[in-house]
Amino acid sequence: MSTSELPAMKSSPKFIFFTDFDGTITLQDSNDFMTDNIGYGQEKRKQGNKDTLTGAVTFRESFKGMMESVTRPYKECIQYLVDNIKLDPFFDEFLKYALANNIPVVVLTSGMEPIVEALLEALVGAENASKIQVVGNNVKAKDGRDMMNDEDGWELTFHDDSDFGHDKSLTLRPYAQLPEDKRPTMFYAGDGVSDLSAARETDLLFAKKGHDLVSYCVKEEIPFTLFETWESILGKVKEIVAGETTVKEAAEEGVKQFKAGNA
């Protein structure tokens, strides 16, 4: 695939930041929040997460069940999340830095694009939200129903046929395979199960401290660096862009911190 076919390459950037959305950019996972409060509840949702990690079910199967348990009209779901989901306090600062330094930000989500776009607009403002590419699953009306206003009127549609529902590596790989003289340095930030397919595809993986992605990276020997908030991500990206540290040096930090008991 040529650079002209890749949306984030339009400005010929030297760096691109790909990121998960739920629980990474936001403090809460919007899908978990819906399921726990207006779906089948936290206990069943947490069991689904455990079953996914052990391989008893796929992420696709677990997530489909979660969303099927939420029957409120889609318009109400969006407003419920806009009213309750909070942004990491440092993401807005990171986004402004990225936009000012030609670092495209691409959200790769296992959530639904309309919800993520509505939340971004509410959390960072319409102008900056419009500059973030969102790639994720989608939603459609059930037969003959008004998706936005009818009870049980919508259903999840997946991005692809993978066990993840949205295999994030499929978006990342064309960038990773660009010729060396055109290929940007690729960052990725994530926290959980839906980020497993992306973990091997980027140059520097930021894994959220205390979450499932850290355990997976250690088990699979995938280099990573830890973050708790976007303040530390911003600091590390600035150092790399300025040439004060390398991606390789940053990637070795996470394993050292884990072995020292700090992950």
Image: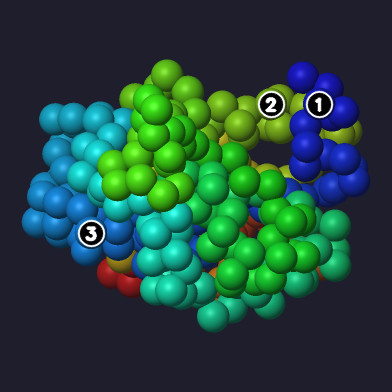
Q: In the image shown, does 135 or 71 lie closer to the viewer?
A: 71
Which circle, 1 or 2, is nearer the viewer? Answer: 1
Inter-mark Cα distance, 3 to 1:
40 Å
State the SS at label 3. helix
Q: Amino acid at mark 1?
A: Glu
Which circle, 3 or 1, is nearer the viewer? Answer: 3
At label 3, counting other C-alpha atoms closer than 10 Å, the crowd grade (few under 14, some 14-19, many 20 or more) is some
Inter-mark Cα distance, 3 to 2:
38 Å
At label 1, counting other C-alpha atoms closer than 10 Å, the crowd grade (few under 14, some 14-19, many 20 or more) is few
State the SS at label 2. helix
Residue 24 at x, y percent in the picture: 47, 61
| Residue 45 visible in image | yes
Q: Which mark is residue 38?
A: 3
> Residue at left 51%, top 73%?
87
> Residue at left 14%, top 30%?
56
Residue at the disc numbered 1: 5
Q: Does 17 sit above or below residue 226?
A: above
Q: Earlier in the sequence, mark 3 or mark 2?
A: 3
